[in-house]
Amino acid sequence: MSTSEFLDEQMQTPPDGLYKGGLLKIMKDLFFNNNKDDNLPCEIQEGLFLGSIGAAYNKGELLRHKVTHILSVENMVEPLYPLEFKYKRVEVRDSAYVDLRQYFEECFEFIDEAKKNGGAVLVHCFLGRSRSVTIVIAYLMKTYGMNFKEAFDVVRKKRPQASPNPGFCSQLSRFEKQLLETHDTLHREESFEKDQIVKTC
């Protein structure tokens, strides 16, 4: 089922977790015009998935990939399946003026919690291009000692539409400098190469 078909179905019986006022119709129109078939989670590495709100709605695919945690980096939709998945929300807009760095560490902890317990996590925003991508890039930088470009290349190979806004790119550049200054890159628990890498979605 495509995302547009899914939203058609949801418009017939809107879940309680969604805001009122025609949000579903707006979402459907946006997906139809820009992203209508983007409802599959992209596996960046074993246990770490990235996607749009469509992927977050795709319960069947989430269960198939054994996703246990969902990190929502958006400010529009309440958790849809709170009984099936553990959620964390970072309620921010996709704006170059938003300080997303302040949330990095708590997001990293949530991702690690899922992976260490044998589960998997989906990190998503609305279109799966900017906010969620920024979090995943930062996570790869911190966890595996990558620089900004290396982490961005890994993500873009799996999700070509990845495109953090200029403000987030600037924050990631500063984060890279911070990691170098504090020597965090010298304390890696494991190399990225040893983790299972999957093909592009």
Image: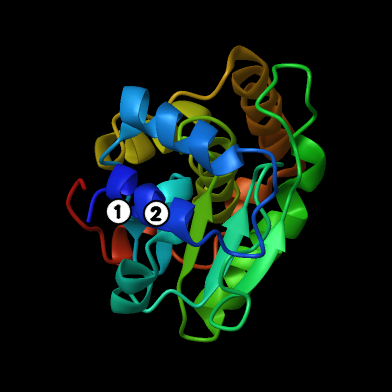
Label 2 sits on residue: 55
In this rendering, the answer to whether 170 lies above or below 26 is above
In this rendering, the answer to whether 117 lies above or below 57 is below
In this rendering, the answer to whether 35 lies above or below 77 is above
Question: Residue 10 sits in which quadrant?
Answer: bottom left
Disc 1 marks a residue whose amino acid type is Leu
Compared across the picture, whether 188 is left or right of 158 comes to right
User: Of helix, strand and loop, which one carries label 2?
Assistant: helix
Location of residue 124 in the rendering, given as x and y in whole percent from the top left corner: 52, 49
User: Of helix, strand and loop, which one carries label 1?
Assistant: loop
Disc 2 marks a residue whose amino acid type is Ala
Label 1 sits on residue: 40
In this rendering, the answer to whether 43 lies above or below 183 is below
Q: Earlier in the sequence, mark 2 or mark 1?
A: 1
Would you call the spot at circle 1 few (<14 residues within 10 Å), some (14-19), or many (20 or more)?
A: many
Q: Residue at x 31, y 57 (%)?
A: 193
Q: Residue at x 37, y 56 (%)?
A: 9
The image's colouring method is rainbow
Would you call the spot at circle 2 few (<14 residues within 10 Å), some (14-19), or many (20 or more)?
A: many
Q: Residue at x 77, y 46 (%)?
A: 103
Location of residue 68 in the rendering, given as x and y in whole percent from the top left corner: 50, 78
Q: In the current view of this chain or complex, which residue is farthest to the top?
A: 166
Residue 187 shows in this picture: no
Location of residue 160 in the rendering, given as x and y in whole percent from the top left corner: 29, 30
Residue 28 shows in this picture: yes
In contact (CB < 8 Å): disc 2 and disc 1? yes
